[in-house]
Image (cartoon, helix red, strand yellow):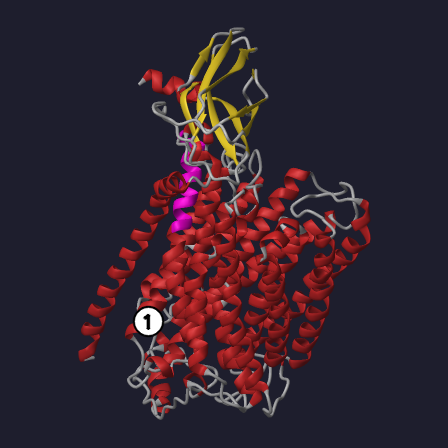
Amino acid sequence: MTAATDTTHTNDHHDDEHHEHHIPPGIKRWLYTTNHKDIGTLYLWFAFIMFLTGGAMAMVIRAELFQPGLQIIEPNFFNQMTTVHGLIMVFGAVMPAFTGLANWLIPMMIGAPDMALPRMNNWSFWILPFAFLILLSSLFMEGGGPAFGWTFYAPLSTTYSSDGTALFVFAVHIMGASSIMGAINVIVTIFNMRAPGMTWMKMPLFVWTWLITAFLLIAVMPVLAGAVTMVLTDKFFGTSFFDAAGGGDPVMFQHIFWFFGHPEVYIMILPAFGIISAIVPTFARKRLFGYASMVYATASIALLSFIVWAHHMFTTGMPVAAELFFMFATMLISVPTGVKIFNWVATMWRGSMTFEVPMLFAIAFIVLFTIGGLSGLMLAIVPVDFQYHDTYFVVAHFHYVLVTGAIFSIMAAVYYWLPKWTGKMFHIGLAKWHFWCSLVSVNVLFFPMHFVGLAGMPRRIPDYALQFADFNKWISIGGFAFGLSQFIFLALLIKACKKQGEPVSSQVWEGAEGLEWEIPSPAPYHSFETPPVIK
Amino acid sequence: MMNQANTQNKNNRMVVKLLAIVVGMFGFGFALVPLYDVLCDALGINGKPSDTAAVYEAVEIDESRLITVDFITRTNTGMPWEFRSETRQVKVHPGQLNKVSFYVKNSANTDIVGQAVPSISPGTAALYMNKTECFCFEQQTLKAGEELMMPMQFYVDPQIPEDITYFTLQYTLYNVTASADVVAMN
């Protein structure tokens, strides 16, 4: 973990003279760019715009659920909102944000000049806006957009869907192609572009977790592509993969989907583990506790993710033996995850802790992600799942792991590395407001969902029984507050991009270690053209 | 710079390998379809009984046990047939051959092709449900207003585990006129 360089200073001045003038002006810079830092920035801004778009849909959902009865929107439009909100947040916000961070950070962390396949990198980003234009445009077409939930269970997505399903299928194909290209790029970069001396067990954990994530991506995104293709041919070309009348089986859809779907949830959390493992040691001013166990824990979580998919379908009438197998396999995952939580806490133990904004987000992540993990453990228990299945308890669970897990880690990462990217410290006052407003509102938003879920409120329904009214009012107020809090983040990011703020040193944070902190701030357009020497 | 061509080569080889994984996994997604059927058939875990006729010969009747079999019928959305079982429930000895019949009537004013799909609950009983004759093995074409009694003959395998004393056989009737027309045209 202690890697250092002494060649960077000669690099910078080399950059200024030979490369800056190659950058085309205006929009062409961004359209034609093959630079990992430019592409990282594009990914991150795209993810943020999608986060606000998907968030706007969540606001529509919460406005409708503010009180019982139907007030604002039609049930069919409500279903489109829940569906597209999920699709955008998963494929448009969380995944591109992690890919953006990978682009920015992996070459700097392993001492490489750029990603291994820069042209493919440009493609993998630029097909993404088109995928989401296609998906969003389907909302405005006759019959409406996808309304079958982001999991597009057959026969909802085949027999009972609108013709816009074709657009949904193509959009998912393009998103999948983009993720696969991004993943291939990450793997090739990490295998072939490490600076001499950067051995496997010296790689920062963010690099490790992304490497494992990339393997998960190339293993399961093609299965998703297969599943949407089957939905497409079932709906439009008369095949019967999921149609019992033609010899198919609708339950098989769920098996294929969740074979993709469960590794997918780890795709959305493993890079977060890498981020937290970078931030906690910096602000605890101690080396990460149990580096090797972190690597093995990540790898075991990834392997286990392939044998737990059926815990999403306990109520489909599986034999008891299968239910027991999937229950125990699922509970097994809490062991390596527990190792990680333990290591982060042990890293903080007796450290010289300070609470800068990235650390605040990291600590919030550890606490709140653990809450999400515990409700996940509850859902893993078969008889209990029969009660919780398809209720707001599930909604609470996956929003704790995805919002206060994945998204909080992305925000922590942005605050941690933003000064390195812009060369200026972000507005700390705004950042603290952003953190505290988000922290309070996100819990007002998602914590009561546990209770209404346990009391039996079903998910994905635009109306509810009267006894849930008070809780839902609070949930909606928390939702609006969380949505508004993100505009503080937007204001901060705009200030940062205008390069306002105090200049920072190359080290930025007192306790930060790693190659990216040894190049100047802001990070020059080209870094590590000559590989650094790793001590 | 000497290494650049070398790295390029290494990168390309790796990309090809990774793309092979991608293509392989895309294929695996489709391979899951037959795999799923084979596994469910072998283990009898999704309540699908065999879709071919069993042969009834030299089956020993186990008089000591009595198994209750329920029959449930339903028509899928868009299937305008009346469909009911003449027998709601039978009690049978394992190994004993039984005959039940189902009534259908096409109450629409067009000709319709129907296909019944069986499902057994609990699913593990499906392995021991042997049908020697069933209308579900083929499609039925009924003219507008036509009615029909459809026979089904079965026996319960004496190997059926002791703990299964009761199971339900459900038929869902689907309207397959559209796809039957395509087949007829071909």
Instruction: Bin the neighbour count of mark 1 within 10 Å (Cα to Cα): few under 14, some 14-19, many 20 and up.
Output: many
Q: Which residue is mark 1?
A: A189
The quadrant where residue A189 appears = bottom left
Residue at 69% over, 80% down: A429
Residue A441 located within the stretch drawn in magenta: no
Q: Quadrant of the N terminus of chain B?
A: bottom left
User: What is the span of residues highlighted in magenta in the rendered image?
Assistant: A223-238
Residue A230 located within the stretch drawn in magenta: yes
- Between A137 and A91, the one nearer to me in the picture: A91
Q: Position of residue B137 (x, y in %)?
A: 40, 22
Question: Is A256 located above or below residue B145 in the figure?
Answer: below
The quadrant where residue A148 appears = top right
Residue at 59% over, 61% down: A376
Q: Secondary structure at mark 1?
A: helix
Residue at 22% over, 69% down: B10
Q: Position of residue A482 (x, y in %)?
A: 69, 63
Q: Position of residue A338 (x, y in %)?
A: 54, 73
Question: Is A303 located above or below residue A142 in the figure?
Answer: below
Q: Quadrant of the C terminus of chain B?
A: top left
Magenta segment, prevailing SS (helix, strand or loop)? helix
